[in-house]
Amino acid sequence: MRPLVVLAARTLSPSARALSLACADGAPLAYAPGQWVNLHVAVDGEIDKRAYSIASAPDPEHLDRFEIAVTRVETGRVSQALHDLPVGASLAMDGPHGFFTREGVEREPALLVGTGTGVCPLRSMLQAELRGASGPRITLLFGARTQDEILYREELEQLARVQPRFSFQVTLSRPDDAWTGRRGYVQTHLSELIVPGERPHVYVCGLTDMVSDVRRVLKEQLGFDRKHIHSERYD
């Protein structure tokens, strides 16, 4: 168990909040982009814990720091508590955990598919891989209900502008009339984002139903081998 302190907080959407956290002992936190930690939070006098994916890549200048994003769930004790935590508050963590990483296939093209805060481990991967100008093609397909729920939108759009090998694609399931982009669920747009003749590694993160649908389309309709499909569910 390691003690943490809240360094900063910001609003990502009407329901999501980003927290910048630091290890209170100042020692580095060694993790691979895509991994997650358990946060231990005081709720009503008791310590409760929940798993959260790390949303940032290791920062060489601040190896003791990382970011998470939390969706406020009406019945979620921990998510409510994390939304209410002030800057300077203390909590604790264990980890990192998980095998949802790009280790071993960093030089191969990737299609990242996420919905909601499922974009967090994908953002961590992107930050790490796009620090260099050269490398494989990477596409992020992000699904949300409405425009105000597109997490990290400005950052990801800017990244796509300056990195020719990165493409940021969004689809909305409940768009308003002003939306001119893709509509519907992420699983309906997979085939149009795969370059003919290219077989990327696909990383999928989100709720179980979405992950299952994406895996089924990849295997049954697009002929993907399961070794090229990597997934993480957060419900």
Image (cartoon, rainbow, N blue to C red):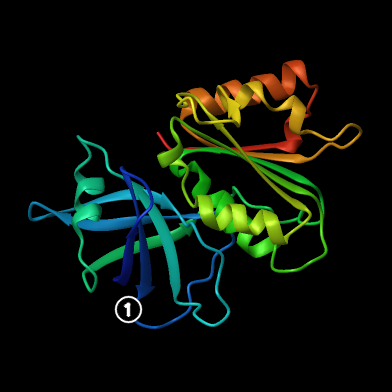
- Measured as percent of width and height from the top left, residue 87 is found at 24, 70
Residue at the (41%, 41%) spot, across then down:
148
- In terms of secondary structure, where does tag 1 sit? loop
- Residue in the picture at 52% in, 26% down: 210
Q: Residue at x 7, y 55 (%)?
A: 45
Residue 84 horizontal side relative to residue 70, left or right: left
**Res 34 visible:** no
Q: Which quadrant: the C terminus?
A: top left
Q: Residues within 10 Å of mark 1 (few under 14, many from 20)?
A: some
Q: Nearer the viewer, residue 192 or 39?
A: 192
The residue sitting at 27% across, 57% down in the picture is: 40
- Looking at the figure, which quarter contains the N terminus? bottom left
**Residue at the far left in the pictured view:** 45
Residue 54 is situated, as x and y percent measured from the top left of the image, at 47, 57
Residue 102 or 194: which is nearer the viewer? Answer: 194
**Can residue 155 be seen by looking at this rendering?**
yes
Amino acid type of disc 1? Ala
Q: Is residue 32 above or below residue 44?
A: below
Question: Where is residue 181 shown, x and y percent of the image?
Answer: 60, 32
Q: Give the answer, above or below, for where 75 lies relative to 68.
A: above
Q: Is residue 35 left or right of residue 84?
A: right
Q: Which residue is mark 1?
A: 24
Q: Quadrant of residue 224?
A: top right
Vertical order, 18 against 71 (above or below): below
**Which residue is most to the right?**
197
- Residue lying at the far front in this picture: please name it: 178
**Residue 5 location in percent, x, y?**
29, 72
Q: Quadrant of residue 155?
A: bottom right
Please indicate whether residue 171 sits to the left or right of residue 82 in the image: right
